[in-house]
Image: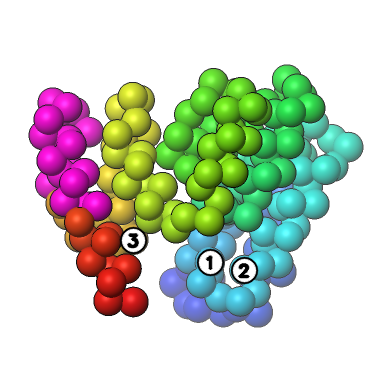
């Protein structure tokens, strides 16, 4: 109901459902909350999940990291890198997946590489990160970056994650050109 009928007052109740024992309820709440991400109160969702990253329960921390990735929470990148630095093996794989989902990069759980990437890219737009993701070695990351670019911009530059390197690069260059044009008109 709350996904079909926009009721921002429901955000607090939906946050509670993110931790429902029934996985389907949890995922339904997450999908519904995703539709509220442009609302100012969505910040409450992210703050809640940031706090859950510090929970005593390993399961709660893993679930929070997963949801942070699902919500593409750029503000959580430093916290997720910190998880990798602590070498919390129970959480590292989920944190790495969340980082990859947010940034469209993959550094095999290396906190040092992630920290280096973050220091170079924290100031850049996430659209630029998505465009960078089009050249990822991992086909799934390339496909995900392309799908998200299409969803966010409503444009299609003909990128095919399975195409040959030359064709992928040509499409990526079209995205780069478009992004530079956007910067000039802003």
The magenta stretch spans which residues?
A: 158-176
Q: Quadrant of the C terminus?
A: bottom left
Q: Residues within 10 Å of mark 3 (few under 14, many from 20)?
A: few
- Disc 1: which residue: 37
Q: Is residue 100 left or right of residue 55?
A: left
Please name whichever residue, 163 or 90, is drawn nearer the observer in this view of the structure.
163
Mark toward the start of the polypeptide (1 vs 3): 1
Q: Is residue 58 above or below residue 41?
A: above
Q: Are marks 2 and 1 in contact (CB under 8 Å)?
A: yes
For the residues bearing labels 1 and 3, Cβ distance under 8 angstroms: no
* Element marked by disc 1: loop
Q: Which residue is mark 3?
A: 152
Looking at the image, which residue is at 80% across and 52% down?
51
Label 2 to label 3: alpha-carbon separation: 18 Å
Tell me the quarter of the picture where residue 58 sits. Answer: top right
Residue drawn at (66%, 67%) of the image: 43
Residue 19 drawn at (x, y percent):
71, 48
Lower position in the chain sequence, tag 2 or tag 1: 1
Q: Where in the figure is residue 90, as x and y percent of width and height?
A: 73, 23
Q: Residue under label 2, please give it.
A: 42
């Amino acid at each position: 109901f709350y996904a079909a009928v926009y009721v921002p007052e429901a955000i607090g109740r939906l946050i509670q459902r993110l931790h429902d024992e029934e996985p389907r309820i949890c995922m339904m709440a997450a999908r519904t909350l995703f539709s509220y991400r442009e609302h100012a109160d969505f910040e409450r969702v992210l703050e809640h999940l940031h706090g859950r990253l510090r929970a005593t329960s390993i399961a709660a921390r893993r679930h929070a990291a997963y949801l942070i990735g699902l919500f593409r929470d750029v503000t959580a990148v430093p916290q997720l890198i910190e998880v990798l630095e602590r070498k919390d093996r129970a959480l590292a794989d989920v944190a790495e997946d969340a980082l990859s989902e947010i940034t469209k990069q993959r550094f095999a759980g290396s906190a040092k590489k992630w920290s280096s990437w973050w220091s170079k890219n924290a100031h850049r737009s996430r659209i630029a990160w998505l465009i960078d993701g089009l050249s990822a070695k991992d086909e799934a990351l390339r496909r995900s970056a392309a799908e998200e670019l299409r969803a966010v911009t409503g444009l299609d530059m003909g990128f095919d994650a399975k195409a040959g390197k030359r064709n992928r690069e040509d499409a990526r260059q079209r995205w780069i050109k478009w992004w530079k044009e956007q910067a000039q008109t802003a």
